[in-house]
Amino acid sequence: MIDPYDWIDRSLNTIHKAQWHRSPAPIEASQGNYITVAGRQLLNFASNDYLGLATDPRLKAAAIQAIQIYGTGSTGSRLVTGQRPLHRELEESIASLKKSADALVFSSGYAANLGTIAALVGDRDLIIADQYNHSSLKNGAILSQAKILVYQHCDLNHLQKLLKNHRNQFRRCLLVTDTVFSMDGDLCPLPGIMELATAFDCMVLVDEAHATGVLGATGAGAIEHFNLDPDRLVCIGTLSKALGSLGGYVSGSAKLIDFLRNRCASWIYTTALSPADTAAALKAIELIIIKPSIGRQLWHNIEYFRTLLASTNIKMIPSDSAIICWELPSAEQALKISGLLQEQGIFAPAIRPPTVPTSRIRFTITAAHRSADIEKLAATIESLGG
Ligand SMILES: *Cc1c(COP(=O)(O)O)cnc(C)c1O
């Protein structure tokens, strides 16, 4: 008998041979700077919880209170039975953090990217995207059916050349980029992208997943960092990184948000964010606004790690954020170093192709790390890489 699923075995074999196979490690407990894996406490340098808010008692209390008032499920889509007062409160709060006119909350950042890109452009349009964009941006572009062109990572000259050669053959054009790149930690040249967008009549969509709560004087992200007008861009973000909850959002002009409420399939045809997740994110933004010292602690820790590394001969991939990567020659080497770090009590994953072009260990620094944690990380890296 022919097994129509036979090809999966062959495909898995290929994945194993390339050292690309992955399976999730169960994290038994997570508390600020530590996680527990297989009964062992490890220093966590892999979390996207940049401000240490995911286990904050104030977020927990807000989530519990929301469950007590509204229950665990939101029971329907926003346009039917799903909307609670909390959802609009959260959207107003995101808009005020981002200094934009309005915002729209999604079930995840991934869903926000898929639906928003597909709503903004179609088969008569053009998307020009950075080579290292996040998976959700790439798949959103495919879903939209627009023509997709890719420019070399952060290369404005290449972007300009593509615009010159192709822009006038299409109706609308959308430039798409991460602001902070998730697997490298560097920052896109956003002011230059905005200039080209103006010159060539393009919309600009940015993914601020790793910039929100991290960059900018008030933690609003890269748009604030570069002092740009938020309502001239389509800004996407997540509630699940610095905001310690779950969900995604789009922020921008009032007409953009009103349009998405009417045309964005991944917002219309899905269940509204749960009351607990909504309330936790709302509390996180309130804390970021009233307690800027959390963000300052994060940057203090990032600078401390950079200073300690500077006195070693270990070279990291250039970074402008809390993501700092150690590039290694092979997937095998990256796996080995990640295992050795774990033996020394440090959790940091090996990131390998096909996620990234070159293998690396990806470290994330958070506000929850203590000086001693960062000292231990730097010393361990030096002992393994020297
Ligand atoms: C994590 C991430 C997302 C997806 O956000 P979720 O809310 O986790 O779905 C989108 N874009 C980038 C750049 C990310 O790092």
Image (cartoon, helix red, strand yellow):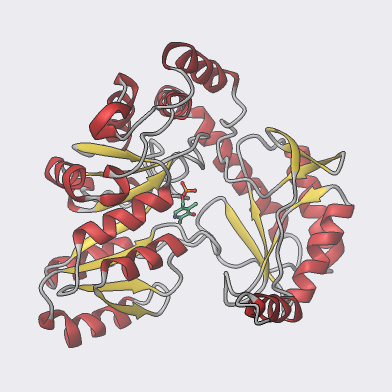
Q: Quadrant of residue 339?
A: bottom right
Instruction: Give the side of residue 187 with respect to residue 322, left or right.
Output: left
Instruction: Give the side of residue 53 with respect to residue 239, left or right.
Output: right
Q: Is residue 222 visible?
A: no
**Residue 76 screen position, x and y as percent:** 34, 32
**Front position in the image: 14 or 161:** 14
Q: Residue furthest front?
A: 1
Q: Quadrant of the N terminus?
A: bottom right
Instruction: Give the side of residue 42 with respect to residue 60, left or right.
Output: right
Q: Is residue 349 above or below residue 131?
A: above
Q: Quadrant of residue 42?
A: top right
**Residue 377 screen position, x and y as percent:** 77, 50
- Residue visible at 46% across and 18% down? 71
**Front position in the image: 161 or 224:** 161
Q: Is residue 183 visible?
A: yes
**Residue 172 screen position, x and y as percent:** 13, 69
- Residue visible at 65% across and 82% down? 2
**Residue 72 screen position, x and y as percent:** 49, 23
- Residue visible at 79% across and 59% down? 381
**Front position in the image: 231 or 123:** 123
Q: Is residue 109 above or below residue 277?
A: below
Q: Quadrant of residue 360?
A: bottom right
Instruction: Give the side of residue 383 with respect to residue 77, left or right.
Output: right
Q: Quadrant of the C terminus?
A: bottom right
Number of numbered labels in the structure image: 0
- Residue visible at 59% across and 74% down? 354
